[in-house]
Amino acid sequence: MSETASFPPHRGERLDSFFDTAMEAVAELERCRARLHGALRVAYFLYSDVQREMDRAGLVLGLEAVPTMAGALRPQLGLVCRATAAEETATKKGEEQIQESYEFAVVSMADGDENDSARWFASAPSVGLRECQQRFREVVNACVEAVEAQKRAIAAAEAYRAVVAQTA
């Protein structure tokens, strides 16, 4: 006879069910961690892409966006980067390639808040930036799911350990 036959049938089945529950909880934890890893990878890639896009467009936080006290010195001129018309250049193989170019322009900061790029994009962020924000919200949700799955896996493992200790 095997060792499991020495236990009454209901104890062995009970031990197996706790073990199966613990293994299912660990498998769910691994699935949650894999989703978290994938979501973080996608969000980070999109973030670096959006960062390059914003750097190319010259969206730098303007000094006007920084709150100042009344009577403090304020900048009179600001520097912005604007895209110019795309130029077509011929390559060695005769193919035409479009190159974007950007030029710096001096703007008067005393004209008002409309020259401040931080205010332009605070109320209407670009599609890429909104998508990036959505991806990072998904990362946060995946983190919460992974933590909850970890708690369930630990609880299932402790329950299995307690049942094993009782049967020993």
Image (tube, rainbow, N blue to C red):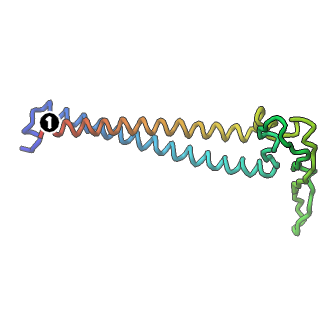
Amino acid bearing label 1: Gln
Left or right: where does residue 29 sit relative to residue 37? Answer: left
Please determine whether, in this image, residue 99 is positioned above or below residue 157: below
Quarter placement of the C terminus: top left
User: At 24% from the left edge and 38% from the top edge, which residue is drawn?
Assistant: 160
User: At 77% from the left edge and 32% from the top edge, which residue is drawn?
Assistant: 123
User: At 46% from the left edge and 40% from the top edge, which residue is drawn?
Assistant: 32
Left or right: where does residue 151 sit relative to residue 117? Answer: left
Residue 21, horizontal then vertical, whole percent: 30, 35
Given residues 40 and 80, the one toward you in this image is 80
User: At 37% from the left edge and 36% from the top edge, which residue is drawn?
Assistant: 151
Given residues 162 and 8, the one toward you in this image is 162
Q: Farthest bottom residue?
A: 92
* Numbered label tally: 1
Query: Helix, strand, or loop for circle 1?
Result: helix
Quarter placement of the N terminus: top left
Residue 75, horizontal then vertical, whole percent: 87, 45
Identify the residue under disc 1. 166
Q: Farthest top residue?
A: 10
Near mark 1 (Cα within 10 A), the count class, few <14, some 14-19 or many ≥20, is few
Residue 118, horizontal then vertical, whole percent: 79, 40
Q: Farthest front residue?
A: 71
Left or right: where does residue 65 sit relative to residue 43? Answer: right
Left or right: where does residue 52 sit relative to residue 112? Answer: left
